[in-house]
Amino acid sequence: MTDTIPRTTNLGHGTPAVCRLGLASRGNTHLSAADVRLAIDKGVNYLNWCKHRDGMSQAVSELTSEQRERVVVAFQLYARTAHDGEKELSNVLSMLRTDYVDIVTFYYVESPSEWNEITGPGGTMEYLQEAKREGKIRLVGLTTHQRALGVEWMKTGLLDLLMIRFNAAHTGAETDVFPISRELGIPVIVFTCMRWGAVLEPTPEDPADFEPPKAPEWYRFALCNPEVSLVLMAPNDRRELVENLSIIERWEPLDPESVRLLREHGQRVKKYVGSFP
């Protein structure tokens, strides 16, 4: 455990340095454009958009050219073929009123057959490489729950980053992913840091005096891991957003005892909420 944790990270490929706490929309959240601007004003400059018309898309479309250069915009791509990828990216650029997006991540690739379709002749990867050359995108990433497959795909050299779930109840990436991503120099962005809110709830085996920590501490848990390039938060509304933004105002690591307590509660949550690798 160190006395400090990095506040920013550089994803490369011409993108500006970004705060390691990023903001994501999920399609069922209630953040307004004003809420997203509040996050940007506080220093959050990585925006992961879910492709629904929402406060995030409105906020991005209203950025000035100067503001746009300081913000990294990512979106989740559903297309698996070059034709569909070109159409989808064109629609995104139009919706966001921008000439480029910084990062495109394939949305939940969970099987070898999907990867083969994406990377084979006529697959989406073919078009995205062209889009990179044309300056329409800067980085290509992938989102998956399959750690072993994610590692295999990172090794192909076709991906600039990986998105994977990671939280105190789901720590497999510490052994399965992070050593490889460090070796390859590929940034890892993590999501589901609260295990869909389960870590905020008590379990039958909690110590008598234990109270589950609030959301910011679970995000800090991920931020304290040096192998995590960026942590995505996805608050439902302004109240949750403001609570999470307190991390930026008090940017500091957890002490070893706090880390231990979070890990122990995470394992209790894993036991009672559901079994997963």
Image (cartoon, grey):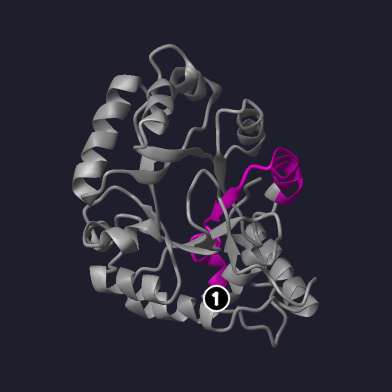
- Pointer 1: residues within 10 angstroms few (<14), some, or many (20+)? some
Residue furthest to the bottom:
209
x, y percentage for residue 63?
26, 62
Q: In this view, does 36 lie above or below 270?
A: below
Q: Give the range drawn in magenta.
A: 174-203
Instruction: Identify the image quadrant of the N terminus.
Output: bottom right
Displayed quadrant of residue 32: bottom left
Q: What type is the residue that disc 1 sits on?
A: Pro
124 with respect to 231 (left or right): left
Residue furthest to the top:
121
Residue pointed to by mark 1: 216
268 with respect to 216 (left or right): right
Q: Is residue 69 above or below residue 93?
A: below
Q: Is residue 255 above or below residue 119?
A: below
x, y percentage for residue 128?
40, 28
Verify whether residue 159 appears in magenta.
no
Instruction: Identify the image quadrant of the C terminus.
Output: top right
x, y percentage for residue 258?
73, 78
Displayed quadrant of residue 272: bottom right
Residue at (66, 79) in percent of width and height: 252
Asked if residue 107 shows in the view, the reply is no
Q: Nearer the viewer, residue 152 or 8?
A: 8
x, y percentage for residue 185?
68, 42
8 with respect to 236 (left or right): right
Q: Nearer the viewer, residue 213 or 139?
A: 139
Residue at (30, 55) in percent of width and height: 27
